[in-house]
Image (spheres, rainbow, N blue to C red):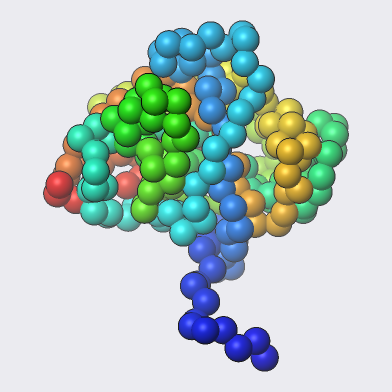
Amino acid sequence: MTNYAFSPAAVPAVEIRGTDALFPVRRIFCVGRNYADHAREMGNDPDREPPFFFTKPGDSIVANGATIPFPTATQNLHHEAELVIAIGLGGADIAPADAAGHIFGYAAGNDLTRRDLQSQAKAARRPWDMAKGFDNSAVIGAIAPAAEIGHPEHAALTAHVDGDLRQSSDIDQMIWPVADIIAYLSGLVTLCPGDLIMTGTPAGVGQILPGQTCMVEIAGIGTAAVTLGPA
């Protein structure tokens, strides 16, 4: 028996649709600027960039329907509606044609972002870690197993804040589709069971205020809702 100096942290996990089993989370990778309209919205040229990635801690996960404290150190918290890939079989240098075999399932997600901190980091040419990887920053809905829904190439993706439509697109608008994301990322790191990949957001990102509820929905896959507490 390993003698730890103190008890290890609990394993972060996400619900799996239709079962009481949980998906244990190892790492969360996020794709930047993966929708052309959002890249332009943020002042970038989507035709000149290969995919790039940032990460969130596994323990930043928030379950669908949760209420969370309003994040500290921000005056401009944004929602970013995203498709999430759950990896069930690890590997390195995975070919696009083989990517589907490594996918356990899919979920709706919300990449909460402290936009003011991100803008400051960009201006100073510094990492985005504290803008993206803070406590309760990864809202992840229940995973829909690929064994049940297959590997959807088209699905409406929306985000509503207090019932008002903010984002509306389709996952087929991603610059780098699922298979290409897995192939590229697995050339940089060895993917492992339990890894999640948040695949980027379309245009329409915007501010969420204290007390508001943001609902992300992907047709045929699920929802990821979160309510913010007072500032």
Residue 17 higher or lower than 10, as above or below = above
Say which quarter of the image contains residue 11: bottom right
Q: Nearer the viewer, residue 108 or 210?
A: 210
Residue at image location 85% in from the left, 34% down from the top: 95
Q: Is residue 81 visible?
A: no
Q: What residue occupies the far bottom of the structure in this picture?
A: 1
Residue at image location 74% in from the left, 32% down from the top: 184
Q: Is residue 22 visible?
A: yes
Q: Nearer the viewer, residue 130 or 19?
A: 130
Q: Is residue 187 left or right of residue 172?
A: right
Residue at image location 77% in from the left, 53% down from the top: 89
Q: Is residue 27 left or right of residue 188?
A: left
Rendering coords of residue 198 (x, y %): 55, 39
Residue 56 higher or lower than 157, as above or below = below
Q: What residue occupies the far left of the structure in this picture?
A: 230
Q: Quadrant of the N terminus?
A: bottom right
Rendering coords of residue 36 (x, y %): 53, 13
Q: Is residue 128 left or right of residue 21?
A: left
Q: What residue occupies the far front of the structure in this picture?
A: 124
How many labels sit on residues?
0
Residue at image location 46% in from the left, 17% down from the top: 38
Rendering coords of residue 230 (x, y %): 14, 49
Q: Is residue 136 left or right of residue 177?
A: left
Rendering coords of residue 31 (x, y %): 57, 32
